[in-house]
């Protein structure tokens, strides 16, 4: 993420004003949870499939849908990576005989 620095000019208050007027910028909304993003995405798809949206509404809905789909994909990717890490710590590599049950059965029959 790149942060841009910029200068701000602050003028003295008007003679008739008794103090400085300060406005706060709204903080960007936090991304919704995976479940909420998916539910919103499903709602957008349903609205678009109904065909009741104007062109402008459809474009806005499509844009929002792309954003939500990206968020969901990123969260799924992160969850899959966590599962891979957990499996790597818990599971050990399986032997070749276990991977091919037919070969393991044939080997067992030869030993009898």
Image (cartoon, helix red, strand yellow):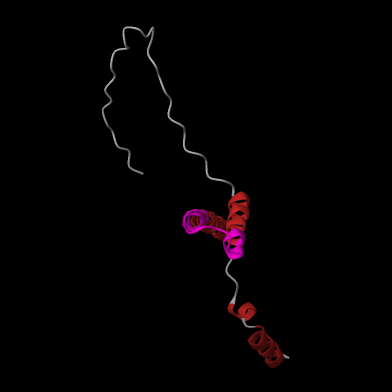
Position of 28 relative to 86 (above/below) = above
Q: Residue at x 62, y 80 (%)?
A: 97
Magenta-drawn stretch contains 37: no
Location of residue 110 by image quarter: bottom right
Tell me if residue 110 can be seen: yes
Predominant SS of the magenta segment: helix
Location of residue 6 by image quarter: top left
Q: Residue at x 48, y 54 (%)?
A: 60
Residue 92, position as x, y percentages in the image: 59, 65
Task: Assign the N terminus to one quadrant of the image.
Answer: top left
Q: Is residue 109 left or right of residue 67?
A: right
Position of 11 relative to 52 (above/below) = above
Position of 47 relative to 24 (above/below) = below
Magenta-drawn stretch contains 51: yes
Marker count (numbered): 0
Q: Which residues are magenta?
A: 46-68
Residue 20, position as x, y percentages in the image: 37, 13
Q: Nearer the viewer, residue 103 or 54?
A: 54
Q: Residue at x 28, y 17 (%)?
A: 11
């Amino acid at each position: 993420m790149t942060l841009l620095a910029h200068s701000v000019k602050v003028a003295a208050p008007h003679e008739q004003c008794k103090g400085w007027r300060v406005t706060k910028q709204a903080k960007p909304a936090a991304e919704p949870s995976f479940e909420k993003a998916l539910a919103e995405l499903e709602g957008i798809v349903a609205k678009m499939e109904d065909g009741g949206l104007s062109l402008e509404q459809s474009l806005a809905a499509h844009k929002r849908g792309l954003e939500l789909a990206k968020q969901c994909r990123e969260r799924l990717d992160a969850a899959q990576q966590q599962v891979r890490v957990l499996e790597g710590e818990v599971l050990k590599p399986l032997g070749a005989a276990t991977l091919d049950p037919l070969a393991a059965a044939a080997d067992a029959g030869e030993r009898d």
